[in-house]
Image (cartoon, rainbow, N blue to C red):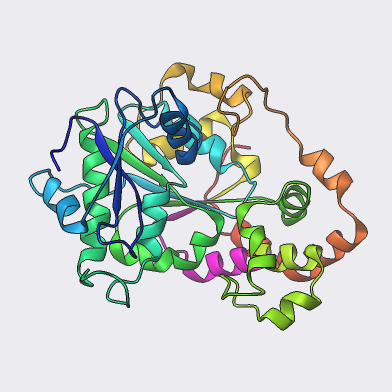
Amino acid sequence: MGFLFRWLPVGFDFNCVDPVEWIDFGNEFLTDPFFFQTLNRLTSKTPPAVSRRTSVVKLIESSAKLPYIEPAGVIFHISRCGSTLLSNTLRLGSEAVVFSEALPIKQLMYHKYGTNGDRGIEAHQNSATLEAVLKLYAKESRYEHSRIVIKCQPEDVFILSRLRKLWPTVPFVIVIRHPVEVIVSNLAGPGGWMRELVDGLSKPNIFRHSAAELRQMTVEEFCTKAVSEFLVATNSQVDNNCCIMDYTDLVPTNIRAIGKLFGIEMPPTFENIMTLDAKDGSRTKLFTDDREQKQNEASELVRQLALSLAEEPYRALLSKRIPFER
């Protein structure tokens, strides 16, 4: 296909002959709190953005002459802990391009090349395909020298060491929060990973629980065990290029420090966005500090489960934090 000025890859289906889906972004950029919100805007407008499909080879070829790029930083988190606030503020920084839980990045992180149905994709194309995606978004950003930030999903802490091998010197930031508050938030409005409680009954799940184990779990037990596993996995993989950041650390001075760590200069006005609800794409809802509310809403069962399963790994990560202003 002829590549137009603003064609960008937005997803992969490796069961298709042409697995790469592209959308014409027109004059749109990644300005929403989440990648899927930008895609929704593109596909719901009148007329909707045009899409095309190509092979992975075409994707790699289209970026072959572009300079090598790797992320300025990667953000991991344990769910409902302020990582979206962090990514939203960094997006305002100089030359920052933020992939917030972006589908094509996620798919390439987990896809195993060379398995049945891959339509001839070779193993070495894993990193090459991911690099091609980053190079194309960097090229089509508004900046001459883009600083790419990847914000992962909670379960991606399980592959932190895999991404470290891919990007040995890239700074990783891991955002955490008191387990009781994370659990209460996910019980009130379940995050995507909570679907594993149901989906895991019929297929393998990211937590490696058997269907029999899942049937025996209450939703509180499942949620607490998951949060505990996020924390334990993070503890086992952090290195000297990882920065642990607690929810209580999310103040302007510290966010500016993270920007500096990523090579991103923050504008004087970036604090304004911190007054808004981080996940509200319309940017009309105000932020409220709900720590006390979450603690008060926690049942005795949640408190007991959090104390027995998640408190220790949480405290272990707190001990690895760099000194932050609070």
Locate the N terminus and report the quarter of the image it occupies.
top left
Residue 37 position, x and y percent, is 49, 35
In this image, 8 relative to 265: left or right? left
Asked whether residue 56 is in view, the answer is yes
Residue 168 position, x and y percent, is 30, 61
Quadrant of residue 7 within the rendered picture: top left
Residue at 63% from the left image edge and 28% from the top image edge: 277
Q: Main secondary structure of the magenta part?
A: helix
Residue at 58% from the left image edge and 22% from the top image edge: 283
Residue at 79% from the left image edge and 73% from the top image edge: 217
Locate the C terminus and report the quarter of the image it occupies.
top right
Closest to the observer: 243 or 177? 177
Q: Residue furthest right?
A: 300
Residue 61 position, x and y percent, is 11, 51
In this image, 89 relative to 144: left or right? right
Asked whether residue 256 is in view, the answer is no
Position of 280 relative to 178 (above/below) = above
Q: Which stretch appears magenta?
A: 229-243
Q: Residue furthest left?
A: 65
Q: Does the magenta stretch include residue 236?
A: yes
Closest to the observer: 248 or 13? 13
Position of 49 relative to 286 (above/below) = below
Closest to the observer: 132 or 241? 132
Q: Is residue 42 magenta?
A: no
| Numbered disc total | 0
